[in-house]
Image (cartoon, rainbow, N blue to C red):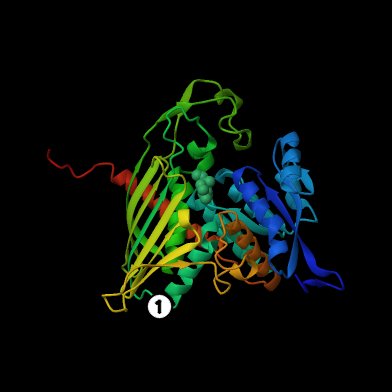
Amino acid sequence: MGTTEEPGAGPRPLGVGMVGYAFMGAAHSQGWRTVGRVFDLPLRPVLAAVCGRDGQAVRAAADRLGWAAAETDWRALIAREDVDVVDICTPGDSHAEIAVAALEAGKHVLCEKPLANTVDEAEAMVEAAERARARGQLAMAGFNYRRVPATALARRMVEEGRIGALRHVRVSYLQDWLVDPDFPLTWRLKKEYAGSGALGDLGAHAVDLAQYLAGEPLVGVSALTETFVRERPVLKDSVGASAGLAAGDAGTGRGPVTVDDAALFTARFASGALGSFEATRFATGRKNALRIELNGEKGSLAFDLERLNELSFHDHTEPGDSAGFRRILVTEPGHPYLEAWWPPGHGLGYEHTFVHQARDLVHAVASGQQPEPSFAEGLRVQRVLAAVEESALKNSVYTPIPV
Ligand code: SOE
């Protein structure tokens, strides 16, 4: 892309085409709708078209979410001249095919996490992204929790050396929406659509955030996974038309859950720091509880998504009698992303992470700089997920403890 200004008309438009319009599609739409009204951008995002297989439903979604047009075939969406960025918000089984085709069609791509369902698919996506980069197109993985101002501040503080050499990273991501054994068999519970269960859905966020904040990769894991409820009711459409469940699968009583309900693992970082991870959909009372704590030689940082405007910091270089965790209210104009929002203390929420993600991608496109996280970083997460699954299989024989 050349100059970003149209003579006398402000920033040039950047056409966005989105595939999928369920929960993540709604969240991304919110980001695209809002970003140009809050941030001063070098390009002007335009919600050009949204795509889904059901014509009536996608037209209704376009109206509801603010998209100018609707398409029923993603190939038609990526062929559109008014689409510069393809935003992929579908289940994981279609990420690779759509992303590779969009990059090859000369579009920039934003792809929801986890990047893919398998390491092979993620590798193909990285290769396509590298080829595209040489032609000037960019690819970004959608790990939105990097874009909470408090996590971005935590990253800055780690980079500044505020916690010193890292020793521990402790992450848990807890939800409880699967506790009821009669909760239906949705696409998220089928390996062929979702790749894995709590591991890919929640563990992917935990791993990405841990590697991002630590500033280093994980190099080994030891894991346990479990599927507590192995069969669930197959309701008509419960797997979701968009996931393409064969018609014959619907209305047949109970069907097998083919992904994990929970994944626990310990891990080693490249520096030798130790990590512990827990991802589950069975933590009663926990709705979307993502917590991370980093302990370094000089201090600690802790973040809790349920209190997302806050970051806890302990400075271990302070005198012991007055040192201790203190709460930083991350709403100052000097804090990441906050210069464009409300006066100090007024706070942001979950949806703002998608506005920030859109902001960072627009700046990357305008400057030609690689946005973060790259597809290569998405692949790194995918490799960790695969290692967790492999390790969990090996760990299925426990060291027995006499009772
Ligand atoms: C579902 O459990 C889910 O929506 C994830 O898919 C998201 O990535 C996470 O942010 C919230 O929970």
- In the current view of this chain or complex, which residue is farthest to the right? 8
Say which quarter of the image contains residue 267. Answer: bottom left
Horizontally, is 229 left or right of 124 in the view?
A: left
Camera-nearest residue between 157 and 105: 157
Viewer-nearest residue: 386 or 170:
170
Which residue carries the number 1 mark? 161
Q: Quadrant of residue 339?
A: bottom right
From the top left corner, tell me how far across and down residue 2 is, in percent: 77, 73
Would you call the spot at circle 1 few (<14 residues within 10 Å), some (14-19), or many (20 or more)? some
- Where is residue 19 drawn, in percent x and y? 67, 47
Looking at this view, is 152 or 55 the one in front?
152
- In percent of width and height, residue 206 lies at 43, 55
Residue at the spot x=66%, y=44% of the render?
21
Residue 293, position as x, y percentages in the image: 37, 62
Most foreground residue, 339 or 400 = 339
In the depicted structure, whether residue 261 falls above or below residue 359: above
For this orientation, the residue located farthest to the top is 252
Q: How many marks?
A: 1
Q: Note whether 387 is above or below 161 in the view shown.
A: above
Q: Is residue 399 left or right of residue 248?
A: left
Quadrant occupied by the N terminus? bottom right
Q: Quadrant of the C terminus?
A: top left
- The answer, for residue 104, to whether it is visible in the render is no
Kind of residue sitting beneath label 1:
Gly
| Residue in view at x 23 percent, y 43 percent | 398
Instruction: Locate residue 206 relative to residue 169 in the image: left or right.
Output: right
Q: Could you tell whether 52 is left or right of 256 in the image?
A: right
- Which type of secondary structure does the marked residue at label 1 adopt? loop
